[in-house]
């Protein structure tokens, strides 16, 4: 039984999600104490509980502590099983964070799977569907798997109600990945999307983002979804290159000016662009687990966050891998995963 102190390092939900995926793959049971101890609302919340139950279904596991607010979880897998799964969060909790738990596990299953998750698709402090689909999954597929995702319905915080369908074909081969430069620029865009809100909000947002980025009108897009998928608003700044892609997101919230939402995410994108690192902070964190399950590799990123460092430590508890980080040049760092 592996015992993990959930208050160490970053102290959030990623410790639980990575532990569940790795336990399902390796068959090693674990106990996680002090769940999400460093969060304003510690313990399991709805999306974490859904991830726990989802992993238990995929891995045929027995679980303890499966209730909202629980600060201790025990998970004992039996057999990882491919299949067709539907998981409903029941709130606007992030669907992509649930997918971060079960998709890595199903990459190592004995056959193809389909996973449907209902909940939030565009949430603060969580990757939106577009990041999962356009930034993260291409790297997973480069590692030797075949994973596709479809946004069947948007679900904005705080209402939720979104639906994502993912098809997972496990590793046919296990490939190391290497990305040390971005390559030439290929495309860039700013998208402001509204549902059940005035289109003028999105117009103000793309204008405010462009005032920071200076990309020009041809790169700006306003999208209006049906009212029954709202109310909600998201601004996304996306930059594509020959070897990589990044996407930055801000979710509009009541009481926050549209211009402030857009300017904030535009400045975040501009800061990353200035580093010339091919892999952004959040993608760096998310690549570690599938790389450890495949054949490792290396990439250049920004200085690893505490989130990334904590994820590396959790992976090391379940797998005999070495994850090293060292400064490269300027603001860039090199991360290597050796399996």
Image: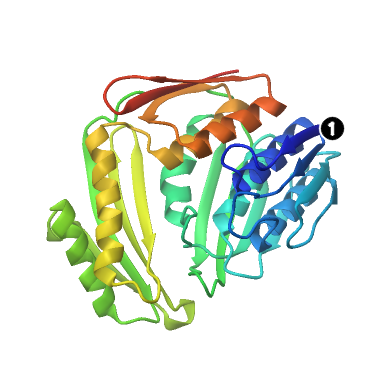
What colour scheme does the image use? rainbow
Q: Quadrant of residue 8?
A: top right
Position of 325 relative to 95 (above/below)? above
Res. 15 in view: yes
Residue 278: % across, % down: 33, 32
Q: Nearer the viewer, residue 225 or 305?
A: 305
Quadrant for residue 263, please give it.
bottom left
Give the residue drawn at x 42%, y 79%.
226
Which x, y percent locates residue 90?
Answer: 66, 70
The x and y percentages for residue 37 are 65, 49
Residue occupying the point 28% across, 78% down: 199
Residue 116 horizontal side relative to residue 288, left or right: right
Label 1 neighbour load within 10 Å: few <14, some 14-19, many 20+? few
Q: Quadrant of the C terminus?
A: top right
For the point 66% across and 56% down, the residue is 42
Q: Quadrant of the N terminus?
A: top right
- Front residue of 90/183: it is 90
Instruction: Please provide percent x and percent y for residue 273.
Output: 25, 39
Q: Does residue 74 appear to the left or right of 213 in the view shown? A: right
Can I make out residue 176 in this image? no
In the displayed structure, 297 sits above or below 77; it is above
The residue indicated by pointer 1 is 1
Would residue 95 appear left or right of 333 to someone viewing this image? right
Helix, strand or loop under label 1: loop
């Amino acid at each position: 039984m592996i015992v993990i102190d959930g208050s160490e390092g970053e102290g959030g939900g990623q410790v639980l999600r990575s532990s569940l995926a790795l336990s399902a793959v390796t068959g090693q049971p674990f106990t996680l104490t002090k769940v999400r101890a460093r969060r304003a609302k510690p313990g399991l919340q709805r999306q974490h509980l859904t991830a726990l139950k989802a992993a238990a279904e995929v891995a045929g596991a027995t679980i303890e502590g499966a209730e909202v607010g629980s600060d201790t979880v025990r998970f004992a897998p039996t057999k990882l099983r491919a299949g067709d799964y539907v998981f409903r969060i029941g709130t606007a909790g992030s669907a992509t964070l649930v997918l971060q738990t079960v998709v890595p596990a199903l990459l190592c299953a004995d056959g193809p799977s389909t996973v449907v998750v209902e909940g939030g698709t565009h949430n603060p402090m969580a990757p939106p569907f577009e990041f999962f689909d356009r930034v993260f999954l291409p790297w997973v597929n480069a590692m030797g798997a075949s994973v596709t995702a479809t946004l069947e319905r948007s679900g904005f915080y705080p209402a939720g109600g979104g639906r994502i369908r993912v098809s997972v074909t496990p590793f046919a081969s296990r490939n190391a990945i290497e990305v040390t430069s971005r390559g030439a620029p290929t495309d860039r865009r700013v998208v402001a999307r509204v549902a059940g809100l005035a289109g003028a909000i999105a117009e103000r947002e793309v204008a405010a983002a462009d005032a920071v980025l200076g990309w020009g009108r041809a790169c700006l897009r306003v999208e209006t979804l049906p009212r029954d998928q709202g109310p909600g608003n998201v601004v996304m700044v996306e930059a594509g290159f020959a070897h990589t892609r990044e996407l930055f997101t801000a979710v509009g919230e009541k009481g926050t000016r549209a211009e402030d939402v857009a300017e904030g995410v535009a400045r975040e994108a501009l800061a990353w662009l200035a580093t010339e690192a091919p892999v952004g902070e959040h993608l760096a964190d998310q690549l570690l687990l599938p790389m450890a399950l495949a054949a490792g590799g290396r990439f250049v990123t920004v200085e690893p966050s505490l989130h990334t460092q904590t994820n590396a430590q959790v992976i090391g508890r379940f797998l005999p891998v070495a994850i090293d980080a060292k400064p490269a040049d300027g603001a860039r760092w090199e991360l290597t995963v050796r399996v």
